Amino acid sequence: MPPAAPRSGEAIFSSVDRVNAKLFTLTYGAIVRQLLNDLEEVEEVNKQLDQMGYNIGIRMIDEFLAKSNVSRCIDFKETAEMIVNVGFKMFLGVTASVTKWDADGSCCSIVLEENPLVDFVELLDTCQGLYYCNILSGVIRGALEMVVMKTEVTWLRDMLRGDDAYELQVKLLSQLPEEYPYKDDE
């Protein structure tokens, strides 16, 4: 039997059980608010959201690979395209695009056309340094690390901060060596 053909993010998104979008958005907002209360420093909240996202990303990649039937990506460019064309659609139901590639293909921007995490959100003046959706940068970083790509993910533009779009910069720092849980030669 031939291997199953890769599935599109749209097809996967439409076939899985989902949580109510408003419930998801409000729950995420409650988490961010609690972090602001507990940690008090906005920069610490940014770090915590990134770490939470990283922990989610290292687990989410397994589900992505199992449900999408994608084969191994050849390079960072193909991986970035897979994230935006399948990953964002599969898990968030949103469309994104990859833009602004550098000359050596190790840095790009991901622009989200919409962001369900920010419905009902307005940043207070005391939270102007907050990257409210920093969990997304951690998810991308964690997922890519599990497929042996060490990256740095930062927000370039954020509509909650007055920008015209949601844009993340993804920079490939290094290809990690693949590690296997056992040795074949023993």
Image (cartoon, rainbow, N blue to C red):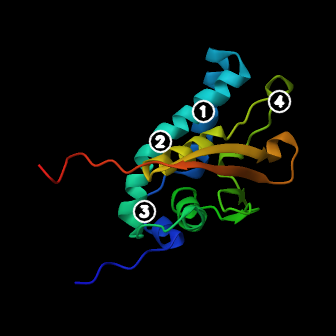
Q: Earlier in the sequence, mark 3 or mark 2?
A: 3
Query: Where does label 1 land, which residue?
Result: 49
Considering the numbered disc 2 on the image, is that residue within a helix, a strand or a loop?
A: helix
Amino acid under disc 2: Ile
Query: Where does label 4 land, which residue?
Result: 128
On the rendered structure, is 163 left or right of 64? right
Query: Where does label 2 land, which residue?
Result: 56
Labelled pair 4, 2 in contact (Cβ < 8 Å)? no
Q: Gap in Å between the C-alphas at discs 3 and 4? A: 36 Å
Considering the numbered disc 1 on the image, is that residue within a helix, a strand or a loop?
A: helix
Which of the numbered marks, if any, corresponds to residue 16? 3
- Whether residue 95 is situated above or below residue 182 in the rendered picture: below
Q: Which of marks 1 and 3 is nearer the N terminus?
A: 3
- Whether residue 116 is situated above or below residue 46 in the rendered picture: below
Instruction: Please state the horizontal and vertical placement of residue 82, each as a whole percent of the image.
Output: 54, 66
Q: Quadrant location of the N terminus?
A: bottom left
Q: Which of marks 1 and 4 is nearer the N terminus?
A: 1
Labelled pair 1, 3 in contact (Cβ < 8 Å)? no
Q: Earlier in the sequence, mark 3 or mark 4?
A: 3
Q: Gap in Å between the C-alphas at discs 3 and 2? A: 18 Å
Instruction: Please state the horizontal and vertical placement of residue 50, each as a whole percent of the image.
Output: 59, 35
Q: Looking at the image, which residue is at 50% across and 44% down? A: 142
On the rendered structure, is 132 left or right of 9? right
Q: Gap in Å between the C-alphas at discs 2 and 1? A: 11 Å
Considering the numbered disc 4 on the image, is that residue within a helix, a strand or a loop?
A: loop
Amino acid under disc 4: Gln
